[in-house]
Image: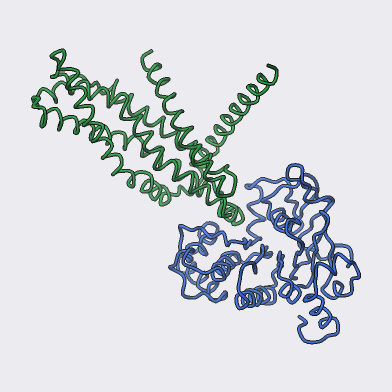
Chain colours: A blue, B green
Amino acid sequence: MGLPGSPASHVEVEDVALRFGRRPVFKDLHCAFPRGQISVVMGASGAGKSTLLRLIGGLQRPDRGHVRVAGEEIAGRGDAALSGIRKQLGMLFQNGALLDSMTIFENVALPLREHENLPEDEVVRRVRARLEAVGLPDVEDLLPRALSGGMLRRAALARAIVMEPAIVLCDEPFSGLDPPNVSRIEALLRDLNRELGLTLIVTSHHMASSLRMADRIFLMRDQACLSGTPLELAQSQDSAIVEFIGEDGAEYLARYASGGEGGP
Amino acid sequence: MDQAIRRLGAFVNQGLMGMGQTAVFGVVVLRSLFVPPLRGRAIVAAIYDSGVLSLALICASGLTVGFVLGLQLYYTLSRFGAESSLGTAVGLALIRELGPVLTGLLVTGRAGSATCAEIGSMKATDQLDGLRMMAIDPIHFVVMPRAIAIVLVMPLLSALFILFGIGGAYLIGVELLGLDGGSYVSSLESAVVFSEDVLQSLVKALAFGVLLALIATYRGYTCEPNAAGVSRATTSTVVTTSVCILLADYILTSLWGV
């Protein structure tokens, strides 16, 4: 695997250090996420994957270092100062984070109603288009608690993309889902990337999906991160990487490296 | 000895820091009231949750307290042959003290704990961070409407509590124990001074509303984002607000006297 970084990076994390109490989470973390690509962040539980997304979203301030989103420094800025940059960001939280007192329609319409001065019929049109895009045309009037885990995740994705952001952060979009829902969400994310040119930064434990969809993989290890393409990952001799990928991943990568079935 | 003094110092320091942080939070919430949009629909919804849904509790409690006051004061006053002053005693006790204080404690238990738990569970399930990521200020969207609603409903609920209390004491004193209805009402009317008693009552209820709104929303907003954290914040809201209401009642009463 090579050094983290890319000349056309959309999001850059540079020299970041962060501790939670006495526990160091990041020490000199460097990584750059390329524009218009799917970057998958992997690593053991507690390695700091979700924290990295929170840093990029400005929800977590680093102790030291720089976080740049679309060239704009966000580290250390407050909510009010981040308002502009957050309109370019969509975030899919692990549990959806939909407002449980609002219907799915109201949840997806919320950012439009808050930030865009649109007539109501245009709001309705856009919300319905997004809900259809994620395969949920008939849930508008339901409350989030009436949806299954997979449907909830897709409704949250609809809300994350309704403002047409340039970057979408997805925190463990596959966790706790059955195989059909994993495939559905994976396909959705790939379509979003291809059709809208979104930069996607996805944290995941789901090896097969991650390797299938990733343009670039970031492996969090020892409070830092390594990055490379899935091919570079396949050729790595690093014992920690080999161990992390496991037999299933290695088998998939071997097929991918030889240009066989299963490659992206 | 040194250790004990250090612990006491740390405890006082922590308490003062908590008070300071709550006050700063209050200023932020107050400032958000003047940031458009007004969130009128959310405020009305929160008034329904905190106010309308507390009506049954307040009315039933007011009536019961009125029954007890009517009974106790009638027998006490009758020892001195002063049972015709029942209206005065009930009216002043309810309007000046019991109305605002008991309403404050009841609303703390019902609406204050619910508000704290709601905001806390929104935090624990990333809903507040979700709002932040949509560039929506959670204080403006979630906290401010609920805080304003509590402040607005407290004087209204207190007034209702007092009315039901007076009514309850009337039922016991007049209908059950045979006191003259006219003397009950006229003694009440002649004893209560609007600019003194009713105004004091409203100011107290408003002050208790501000205390409850501030403590409930602050504790919910700053709780640890997990089930245990929400539970601790809710308990702490009820305990802290109850103590603060009783303390504030003494301070306001003594200041009003001056």
Q: Is residue A142 above or below residue B86?
A: below
Q: For this view, does A251 lie left or right of residue B9?
A: right
Q: Position of residue B48 (x, y in %)?
A: 36, 48
| Residue furthest right as drawn | A237
Q: Position of residue B43 (x, y in %)?
A: 41, 47
Q: Position of residue A250 (x, y in %)?
A: 82, 76
Q: Position of residue A218 (x, y in %)?
A: 80, 64
Q: For this view, does B10 lie left or right of residue B74?
A: right
Q: Quadrant of residue A143?
A: bottom left
- B172 or A196, which is in the foreground? B172
Q: Quadrant of residue A41?
A: bottom right
Q: For this view, does A91 lie left or right of residue B88?
A: right
Q: Is residue B121 above or below residue B97?
A: below
Q: Quadrant of residue B15?
A: top right
Quadrant location of the C terminus of chain B in the rendered image? top left
- A44 or B142, which is in the foreground? A44
Across the whole image, how many numbered discs are drawn on residues? 0
Q: What residue is drawn where x is 66% and y is 60%?
A: A89
Q: For this view, does A28 lie left or right of residue A140?
A: right
| Residue furthest bottom as drawn | A260
Q: What residue is drawn where x is 52% and y is 39%?
A: B29
- B57 or B123, which is in the foreground? B57
Q: What residue is drawn where x is 71% and y is 70%?
A: A206
Quadrant location of the N terminus of chain B in the rendered image? top right
